[in-house]
Amino acid sequence: MLNKLKLAIILILATITTITYADIDPTSQVAVTAIVDTYVHAYEKQDSRAIANLYAQNGAMIDSKQMKVINGRTNIMVAIKQIFRGNEGATISAKLTHMDEKNNIVRASYLLTSQSQEQNGQLVRSTSRLVVALINQNNQWKILKSELSPVSL
């Protein structure tokens, strides 16, 4: 029974982590990947301003766990600063699972894995799904909307 459960979990993870691209320009693909890489590096440096600057001026960040929408770069920066509190030294990795493009908007889905150390020294790992919608404004890609939601594995 345990082996069947392990096999089911492996099959689910294989399905989740399969990368699919649908009708996307390779240039857009590279630009979007670079933005998410910048996001990851800024997160590890706890640079909320750098993350907020990845968003369009009127961008929105949806936090499914807290069930709230944060609008605008300044508010996004404040919200990210709050996320960083208590997460000093956290690391994060992003794995692309899907990307498509329609009407000059790229939608990309990532599986994020974060790891931080609690005060008692115990490592805490969490997995989330990050979905971003990006738009090319004046030859510069910006996050129009992002949604972060927890994933149970």
Image (cartoon, rainbow, N blue to C red):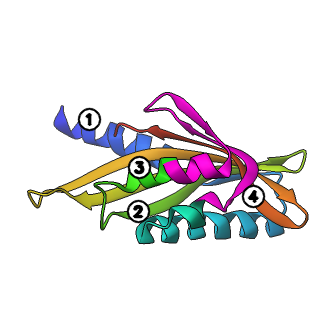
The magenta region covers: 52-78
* Residue 55 in sight here: yes
Mark 4 or 1 closer to N-term?
Answer: 1
Q: Which residue is mark 4?
A: 142
> Crowding near pointer 2: few (<14 within 10 Å), some, many (20+)?
some
The residue identified by callout 3 is: 82
Q: Residues within 10 Å of mark 1 (few under 14, many from 20)?
A: few
Crowd class of label 4 (few under 14; some 14 to 19; many from 20; radius 10 Å): many
Q: Which residue is mark 2?
A: 92
Amino acid residing under circle 3: Gln
Task: Give the number of the mark in front: 2 or 1.
Answer: 2
Dot 1 lies on which element? helix
Q: Amino acid at mark 1?
A: Leu
Residue drawn at x 75%, y 53% is 56
Residue shown at 88% from the left, 50% from the top = 104
Identify the residue at image location x=59%, y=46%: 75
Report the mark closest to the observer, 2 or 3: 3
Residue marked by disc 1: 5
Percent position of residue 30, x then y: 73, 70
Residue closer to the observer: 22 or 108: 108
